[in-house]
Amino acid sequence: MQSTPAPGFHILMVDDDPDDALLFSYAMETLRTPFRFSLHQDGLNLLKTLSDERPNIIFLDLNMPTKNGYECLQEIRSEPSFNNIPVVIYSTSGNKKDIEKCFKYGADNYVIKPFSISGISTMIRKLCNTEWTAS
Protein backbone atom coordinates (compact mmCIF):
# COMPACT_ATOMS: atom_id res chain seq x y z
CA MET A 1 0.00 0.00 0.00
CA GLN A 2 1.27 3.45 -0.89
CA SER A 3 1.92 5.83 1.97
CA THR A 4 0.12 9.12 2.37
CA PRO A 5 1.84 12.51 2.44
CA ALA A 6 3.07 14.01 5.69
CA PRO A 7 0.58 15.71 8.01
CA GLY A 8 0.04 19.32 7.06
CA PHE A 9 0.62 18.69 3.35
CA HIS A 10 -1.19 21.58 1.66
CA ILE A 11 -3.34 20.93 -1.40
CA LEU A 12 -4.82 23.84 -3.31
CA MET A 13 -7.70 23.09 -5.64
CA VAL A 14 -8.76 25.70 -8.18
CA ASP A 15 -12.18 24.64 -9.47
CA ASP A 16 -15.50 26.43 -9.86
CA ASP A 17 -17.63 23.26 -9.54
CA PRO A 18 -18.77 22.83 -5.92
CA ASP A 19 -19.69 19.17 -6.52
CA ASP A 20 -16.20 18.34 -7.77
CA ALA A 21 -14.67 20.16 -4.82
CA LEU A 22 -16.92 18.29 -2.38
CA LEU A 23 -16.03 14.90 -3.90
CA PHE A 24 -12.32 15.79 -3.83
CA SER A 25 -12.56 16.90 -0.20
CA TYR A 26 -14.45 13.75 0.80
CA ALA A 27 -11.88 11.56 -0.99
CA MET A 28 -9.12 13.29 0.98
CA GLU A 29 -10.93 12.49 4.23
CA THR A 30 -10.94 8.79 3.35
CA LEU A 31 -7.13 8.86 3.31
CA ARG A 32 -7.18 9.72 7.01
CA THR A 33 -4.23 12.09 6.76
CA PRO A 34 -4.44 15.62 8.12
CA PHE A 35 -4.08 17.38 4.78
CA ARG A 36 -4.57 21.08 4.56
CA PHE A 37 -7.08 21.73 1.80
CA SER A 38 -7.80 25.10 0.23
CA LEU A 39 -10.33 25.79 -2.47
CA HIS A 40 -10.10 28.70 -4.86
CA GLN A 41 -13.25 28.91 -7.00
CA ASP A 42 -11.67 30.85 -9.84
CA GLY A 43 -8.29 31.95 -11.10
CA LEU A 44 -8.61 35.56 -10.04
CA ASN A 45 -5.95 36.66 -7.56
CA LEU A 46 -4.34 33.23 -7.74
CA LEU A 47 -0.79 34.59 -7.62
CA LYS A 48 -1.62 36.56 -4.47
CA THR A 49 -3.02 33.39 -2.91
CA LEU A 50 0.19 31.53 -3.78
CA SER A 51 2.30 34.35 -2.35
CA ASP A 52 0.35 34.40 0.91
CA GLU A 53 0.30 30.66 1.52
CA ARG A 54 2.26 28.29 -0.72
CA PRO A 55 0.65 24.93 -1.34
CA ASN A 56 2.64 21.74 -1.85
CA ILE A 57 0.58 20.94 -4.97
CA ILE A 58 -2.13 22.62 -7.08
CA PHE A 59 -5.02 20.80 -8.76
CA LEU A 60 -6.25 23.14 -11.49
CA ASP A 61 -9.47 22.81 -13.47
CA LEU A 62 -9.43 24.00 -17.09
CA ASN A 63 -12.99 25.16 -17.65
CA MET A 64 -13.72 28.04 -15.30
CA PRO A 65 -15.46 31.35 -15.87
CA THR A 66 -13.56 34.63 -15.60
CA LYS A 67 -10.05 33.12 -15.86
CA ASN A 68 -9.65 29.62 -17.26
CA GLY A 69 -7.08 27.00 -16.33
CA TYR A 70 -4.79 27.79 -19.26
CA GLU A 71 -4.57 31.42 -18.18
CA CYS A 72 -3.95 30.41 -14.56
CA LEU A 73 -1.26 27.95 -15.59
CA GLN A 74 0.52 30.55 -17.73
CA GLU A 75 0.33 33.05 -14.89
CA ILE A 76 1.77 30.58 -12.37
CA ARG A 77 4.61 29.57 -14.69
CA SER A 78 5.41 33.19 -15.56
CA GLU A 79 6.39 33.75 -11.93
CA PRO A 80 9.76 32.03 -11.30
CA SER A 81 9.19 31.77 -7.55
CA PHE A 82 6.26 29.38 -8.18
CA ASN A 83 7.99 27.08 -10.67
CA ASN A 84 8.69 24.48 -7.98
CA ILE A 85 4.99 24.07 -7.12
CA PRO A 86 3.62 21.07 -9.03
CA VAL A 87 0.51 21.90 -11.05
CA VAL A 88 -1.80 19.03 -11.93
CA ILE A 89 -4.52 19.80 -14.45
CA TYR A 90 -7.67 18.18 -13.09
CA SER A 91 -10.25 18.20 -15.87
CA THR A 92 -13.13 16.32 -17.44
CA SER A 93 -11.56 16.86 -20.87
CA GLY A 94 -9.65 14.02 -22.47
CA ASN A 95 -9.09 16.04 -25.62
CA LYS A 96 -5.55 15.48 -26.90
CA LYS A 97 -5.17 19.16 -27.86
CA ASP A 98 -6.15 20.27 -24.35
CA ILE A 99 -3.61 17.88 -22.83
CA GLU A 100 -0.81 18.96 -25.19
CA LYS A 101 -1.56 22.64 -24.59
CA CYS A 102 -1.38 22.16 -20.81
CA PHE A 103 2.02 20.49 -20.99
CA LYS A 104 3.21 23.21 -23.37
CA TYR A 105 2.19 25.82 -20.77
CA GLY A 106 4.04 24.01 -17.97
CA ALA A 107 1.65 21.53 -16.35
CA ASP A 108 3.41 18.79 -14.39
CA ASN A 109 0.62 16.26 -14.89
CA TYR A 110 -2.84 15.96 -16.44
CA VAL A 111 -5.59 13.91 -14.83
CA ILE A 112 -9.06 13.26 -16.15
CA LYS A 113 -11.36 13.60 -13.14
CA PRO A 114 -12.17 10.17 -11.69
CA PHE A 115 -15.85 9.48 -11.07
CA SER A 116 -15.56 7.60 -7.78
CA ILE A 117 -14.36 8.53 -4.31
CA SER A 118 -11.90 5.62 -4.35
CA GLY A 119 -10.56 6.71 -7.76
CA ILE A 120 -10.07 10.26 -6.52
CA SER A 121 -8.38 9.17 -3.28
CA THR A 122 -6.03 6.82 -5.17
CA MET A 123 -5.14 9.66 -7.54
CA ILE A 124 -4.54 12.09 -4.65
CA ARG A 125 -2.33 9.60 -2.80
CA LYS A 126 -0.30 8.86 -5.93
CA LEU A 127 0.22 12.48 -7.02
CA CYS A 128 0.92 13.82 -3.53
CA ASN A 129 3.67 11.19 -3.11
CA THR A 130 5.32 11.92 -6.45
CA GLU A 131 8.90 13.20 -6.36
CA TRP A 132 8.49 16.31 -8.51
CA THR A 133 11.41 17.96 -10.23
CA ALA A 134 11.53 21.70 -10.87
CA SER A 135 10.26 22.76 -14.30
Image: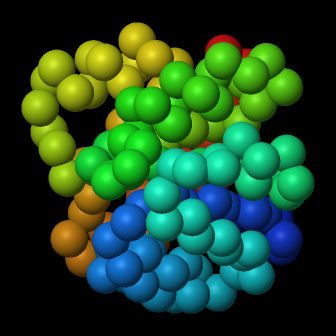
- For the N terminus, the quadrant is bottom right
Which residue is drawn at the image coordinates 64% and 87% (left, top)?
32
Give the side of residue 1 with respect to residue 51, left or right: left
Quadrant location of residue 71? top left
| Relative height, residue 14 to residue 95 (above, below) | below
Can I make out residue 125 in this image? no
Residue 110 location (% of width, % of height): 37, 37
| Relative height, residue 50 to residue 14 (above, below) | above
Give the side of residue 48 with respect to residue 126, left or right: right
Q: Which residue lies furthest to the left in this view?
A: 95
Residue 49 location (% of width, % of height): 75, 54
Report the coloring of the rendering.
rainbow
Which residue is drawn at the image coordinates 17% and 44% (left, top)?
93
Residue 63 location (% of width, % of height): 27, 49
Can I make out residue 87 in this image? yes
Quadrant location of residue 119? bottom left
* Near-viewer residue (13 or 27): 13
| Relative height, residue 134 to residue 8 (above, below) | above
- For the C terminus, the quadrant is top right
Which residue is drawn at the image coordinates 66% and 50% (left, top)?
45
* Near-viewer residue (28 or 77): 77
Residue 125 location (% of width, % of height): 55, 62
Which residue is drawn at the image coordinates 79% and 18% (left, top)?
80
